[in-house]
Amino acid sequence: MKKINFVMPLLLLSFFTLADAASQSENRIKLEPVATAVSAGSVTYKFMLLDSSSSKMIRDSDLVVAHEKKLHMIIYDSSLTEFQHIHPEFDGKIWSATAQFSANGDYWVWAQGELNSDRSEFSASTKLLVSGGSPTKPLPPSLADARTGTSGLSRVSLSSGRLMAGKMAMLDLTMSRTDGTKPVLTPYMGAFAHIIATPSSGDSLIHVHPVTTGDAKGMIHATFPKAGSYRLWIQYIDAGTLKEVPLAVKVF
Ligand SMILES: [Cu+2]
């Protein structure tokens, strides 16, 4: 009798540990900023990355190069109007990157990388409070559906398929120019384009790369986790210039 009483809880315990493993690994790497509030302007943002499973700090030697860099940092404000994709450097003690913060309020800061040890990818986030800048924009952001957007003469369009929460969506991405000339596309950070998406709450991040389907076209595979409006930023290079086009889609 005693033996059975011991075995049963152990079996249950290991079963639940396995089931939870996937969700826990998403939060394994923590972004620990030196400061959680800054004055508006150009800021050298300093932080550490902590592996909470081993309590070890992540150094540059712990990461593999992915899309030409060891660490990618995505920053946007809560109104989802400002966007930066930068690349922090490790100086032997701390990670840092220079970023611009112009509006008051909370900014989302994400660090994305891939661990050398087990090749797992991570996205770690934190918030940064900015003051002394331009007035806070109304929240939550109103994201009107915009599947076409421009930056200078460069234009990006997404196909019109209906997007369903939790279901893999396939969207065509088409690059063109508003003056009818052909875009001259070259890879940006090892990809035809980078698509970064976040829901209006800003609290999750999708970062995908389209598969080139030829002649200024690509296909995006993405799963939007919940219903609602999402901001998308499309980054790509046309005629040697980095373009950054904000779009918005509704997910049902
Ligand atoms: Cu990317």
Image (spheres, rainbow, N blue to C red):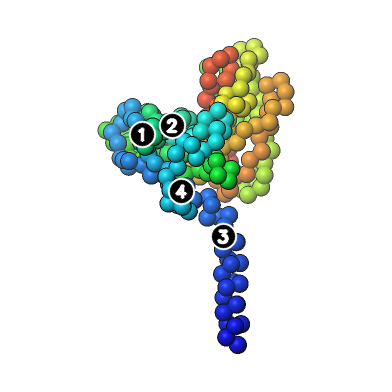
Q: Position of residue 176 (x, y in %)?
A: 64, 19
Q: Position of residue 223 (x, y in %)?
A: 62, 44
Q: Which mark is residue 51?
A: 4
Q: Residues within 10 Å of mark 3 (few under 14, many from 20)?
A: few
Assign a secondary structure to mark 3: helix
Q: Quadrant of residue 186?
A: top right
Residue 145 is left or right of residue 96, and the answer is right
**Residue type beneath disc 1:** Tyr
Earlier along the polypeptide chain: callout 3 or callout 4? 3
Assign a secondary structure to mark 2: loop
Q: Is mark 3 within 8 Å of ligand 1?
A: no
Q: Residues within 10 Å of mark 4 (few under 14, many from 20)?
A: some
Q: Position of residue 73 (x, y in %)?
A: 46, 34
Closest to the camera, between mark 1 and mark 2, is 2
**Residue type beneath disc 4:** Asp
Cα gap from disc 1 to disc 2, whole angstroms: 9 Å
Earlier along the polypeptide chain: callout 1 or callout 2? 1
Instruction: Please report contact status of discs 1 and 2: CB closer than 8 Å, yes or no.
Output: yes
| Residue topped by disc 2 | 88
Closest to the camera, between mark 1 and mark 4, is 4
Q: Is residue 133 visible?
A: yes
> 77 or 124: which is nearer to us?
124
Cα gap from disc 1 to disc 4, whole angstroms: 20 Å
| Residue topped by disc 3 | 20
| Residue topped by disc 1 | 45
Closest to the camera, between mark 4 and mark 2, is 4
Cα gap from disc 3 to disc 1, whole angstroms: 33 Å
**Residue type beneath disc 2:** Pro
